[in-house]
Each structure stands twice: as structure tokens, then as C-alpha cells.
Amino acid sequence: MTKKKLALEIIDRLKQEYPDAGCTLEYNQAWKLLVSVRLAAQCTDARVNVVVQDLYAKFPNVDALADADVEEIEKIVKPCGLGHSKARDISACMKILRDKYQGNVPEDFDSLLKLPGVGRKSANLIMGDVFGKPAIVTDTHCIRLVNRMGLVDNIKDPKKVEMALWKIIPPEEGSDFCHRLVYHGRDVCTARTKPYCDKCCLSDICAKNIT
């Protein structure tokens, strides 16, 4: 089976297994996803979802967050870890949204990459979830699972994994596929325990490159 055919079969099975999978960061405005995805670095989405409630209660919009002292932001986001650098990036990012984009999040991938604290993973997440554009989000679950399944061959660099997946994943499937990998990676193809291959819907087609 070619990698492209394998990818299509995996996509189909994960759709059946996780039909309603979506972004596990909670947000109702694009700028809030931008904040949350920065806070999610080396932190669980569940914790981020709790912390941002206090952040938005005090700073409810882009202008308020842009005007806030970095120290005030840091006090609130500290439970997410790396508080100082995250607070600094969030402050700088909101200032750019206010001053350059009228408080809106740019709908262009390269423009997103120029925002403080935004890398390819974050930019792809926003392109896919907010704007409905083709996107491949290479987070830790994605990288681990596509290597194990045999969709990529021992590639750990996020950008290289992304580029390899673009060649075999239909563009319109990329965003949802990556969300489903998160669910599957948390529930079945786990990182910190032995994967539960006995209850995996992909067991018969997976390369099982488990290290």
C-alpha cells in the first residue's frame, strides 16, 4: 500500500472513530485562539482553558490586552509555565493586532508567522480552525503517530513532517485529520504508556514503528 493510499484509509477510519473531533482549545474569537495556542506550548489544553477564563475576565478584548502591563498578564498565565516569555509574546502580539490589523487576526499564513510567538504549528491551527483553509498542525501527537503508522519515515522535525504530509494528505482533510490524531494519541496511541494496539482501529494497517 502506498503512503497516499494508507493515509486515505487512516483518514477514513479516524473519521468513523472520532466523528466530532475538533480543536480542544476553547475560544469564541480568533484572537483568543491566538492567545491560547501560545499558552499551550509545554502545557495541556485543559489547563489553558481554565487559565484564560481569568485572563479574559480582566482583559476582555484585544485593546485591553494590548494595553495591559506584561507583569499583569504574567501573573495570570504563570500556571501555564514559561510565564514571562508567553506574557511578553501575547502583549506584543495584541499590540500588533490593534495597531496594524484593526484588532483582527490576519488571514494570511505568512502574516501570522510574523506575529510574536507564532510558529508554523500555531499558524496552521488558526488557518484551519478560524479561516477554514487547508492546514496541517504538526504537534507532538501528530509527529508521534504518523511516524508510528508509517506515513513518514523517522522524521521528527515538525516542518519536515508537515511538508511530507502535504504530499499525501488531501488539503481539505488536513485540519480535521490532525485534530483526530490528538484524540487518538491521547486515548489509544499514547506516549507515556505502551500504546493500546489491541483496541486501535488502525491496528491491522499500522506500521507500528514504536520506540
Image: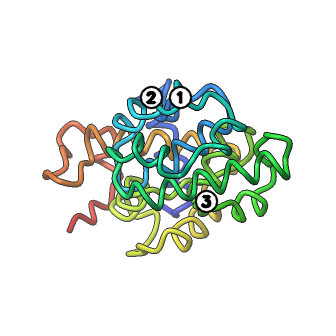
- Chain-order first, disc 2 or disc 3: 2
* Residue drawn at 59 percent across, 63 percent down: 119
Residue 204 location (% of width, % of height): 30, 48
Residue 131's image quarter? top right
Of 125 and 146, nearer the camera is 125
Front of the two marks 2 and 1: 1
Helix, strand or loop status at disc 3: loop
Left or right of 192 in this view: 63: right
Spatial separation of the CA atoms under disc 2 and disc 1: 6 Å
Of 128 and 73, nearer the camera is 73
CB contact under 8 Å: marks 2 and 3: no
Residue 175's image quarter? top right
* Residue drawn at 50 percent across, 24 percent down: 20
Helix, strand or loop status at disc 2: helix
Residue 51 location (% of width, % of height): 40, 34
* Disc 3: which residue: 118
* Disc 1: which residue: 58
* Residue drawn at 83 percent across, 50 percent down: 99
* Disc 2: which residue: 54
Residue 57 location (% of width, % of height): 52, 24
Q: Is residue 113 above or below residue 5?
A: below
> Mark 3: few, some, or many residues within 10 Å (few <14, many ≥20)?
many
CB contact under 8 Å: marks 3 and 1: no
- Chain-order first, disc 3 or disc 1: 1
Spatial separation of the CA atoms under disc 2 and disc 3: 22 Å
The tally of labels here is 3
